[in-house]
Amino acid sequence: MTHSLWEDRSFRGQPDLVVVGGGLTGLFTALHTRRKDASRKVLVLERGPHPAGASVKNVGFACFGSPGQLLYDLDTEGEDVALGRVEERWRGLNELRQTLGDTAIGFEPVGGYEVFRKDDPMHAKVAERLSELNGKLRAIFGMDVFSWVDDRIGELGLNAGHLAWNALEGAVDSGMLMHALLHRVQGEGADVRFNAAVEGWEEQPHGVELHLADGTRIKAGRAVIATNGYARDLVPSTDIVPGRGQVVLTSEVPGLALKGTFHMREGFYYFRHFHGRVVLGGARHLDIAGETTMAEGTTPLIQGDLERMLREVIIPGKDFRIERRWSGIMGFRAHGGPAVVEHLSPHVVLAAGLGGIGVAVGIRVGRRAADLVG
Ligand SMILES: Cc1cc2nc3c(=O)[nH]c(=O)nc-3n(C[C@H](O)[C@H](O)[C@H](O)COP(=O)(O)OP(=O)(O)OC[C@H]3O[C@@H](n4cnc5c(N)ncnc54)[C@H](O)[C@@H]3O)c2cc1C
């Protein structure tokens, strides 16, 4: 086959940068690279027919962590790491909203709650340390972030004992967000190719060669691997482990009063309203070994537990059925800690391991990857 001058100049020339993975991290890496230097050819290779990873499977919390989660992080990771991560999430959230705009991402400033059941032993621990936590966070937010709002339990329709609240979090429509981001990336001149699975890569003297599942090879100056929970496929030595999250969506619930984003059990359950329905995810802790997988799917154990949680705590006494079930794959550092942005070889960078709160940080991980890859 022959190629025209125009094909070669605009569609076939060697990219300066290939980004593998078209989720939040990969698309923001592409956006930041183009913004730094609009003369650079950037190509994103995404194996799905559209962005197909956690960025479109999540439940759309625009959050930085509930009190129970943050106290756990403080105790296990130390103050510098834990507070640094909160700051990163808070900055990321603001940058995300500014970059794409609240309307385009379907942002709703509905606040974030942590729910404690009546007999929940976590409540006493959090209650004892809430002002200590607020004190530590004041340097980031300039205010007391969390307060108790037990008086709202009835009006929200929850069967719970205690409720902590912060006004700074919200919800996004993850489909709208990714659509807006994709549009922006393409508008800034990066190419995005779908149905383009990368099976391997090879460091070369002056760049990198990517091996695609369809047998083609693409040479590029540099590459960023932004495949998050799937990172091990291309980087077997990484410490990033996959973690599946299962989700249920209810039918429309008559008289639903629930509004906001809600965490329970240090973030192991998370739920929100969505157009008169409830979206609920979590319960991974019931089968950590089984959910350490890159395979999408749902299991009776976890789905049953999520349904029980709906009936007993979230919408007790309400009539509903499960309208949809899905799952997505997160990427966690094996021993905790923030996302990895590091060189794998002179021309290849890995940017992955965003964990369970990635919506807020994808924009900043993408910027770090763009800076590091140069
Ligand atoms: C069920 C669930 C609920 C969540 N809820 C929230 C929430 O409410 N709030 C929050 O902040 N975070 C949440 N998260 C986490 C958040 O969604 C992720 O941290 C974030 O989306 C990660 O973005 P990413 O771009 O790094 O990864 P991904 O979005 O997973 O992107 C990786 C991309 O790489 C592609 N890919 C993989 N392998 C290849 C290959 N070999 N070749 C080419 N392409 C490849 C995939 O198809 C995918 O599109 C949730 C995650 C899950 C699974």
Image: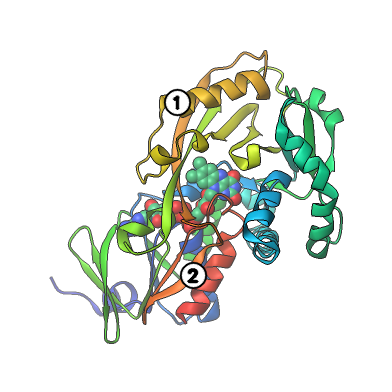
Q: Quadrant of residue 273?
A: top right
Q: Which mark is residue 301?
A: 1
Q: Residues within 10 Å of mark 1 (few under 14, many from 20)?
A: few
Where is residue 182? Give x, y as percent: 49, 58
Measured as percent of width and height from the top left, residue 301 is found at 45, 26
Amino acid carrying label 1: it is: Leu
User: What is the secondary structure assignment of the residue under circle 1?
Assistant: helix
Q: Is residue 108 visible?
A: no
Image location of residue 218, percent across then percent down: 26, 71
Label 2 sits on what residue type? Val
Q: Decide if ligand 1 comes within 8 Å of the CB at mark 1.
A: no
* Discs 1/2, front: 1
Give the answer, above or below, for where 165 lies relative to 336: above
SS category of the residue bearing label 2: strand
User: Which residue is rendered at x = 60% and y = 24% of the image?
Assistant: 309
- Picture coordinates of residue 270, whole percent (x, y): 61, 37
Q: In percent of the image, x 29 and y 57: which residue is there?
A: 197
Check the image and name the residue furthest to the left: 1
Classed neighbour count for the residue bearing mark 2: other residues with Cα under 10 Å, few (<14), some (14–19), many (≥20): many
Residue visible at 72% across and 33% down in the picture: 121
- Which residue is label 2 attached to? 341
Residue lying furthest bottom in this view?
205
Looking at the figure, which quarter contains the N terminus? Answer: bottom left
Q: Nearer the viewer, residue 129 or 113?
A: 129
Labelled pair 1, 2 in contact (Cβ < 8 Å):
no
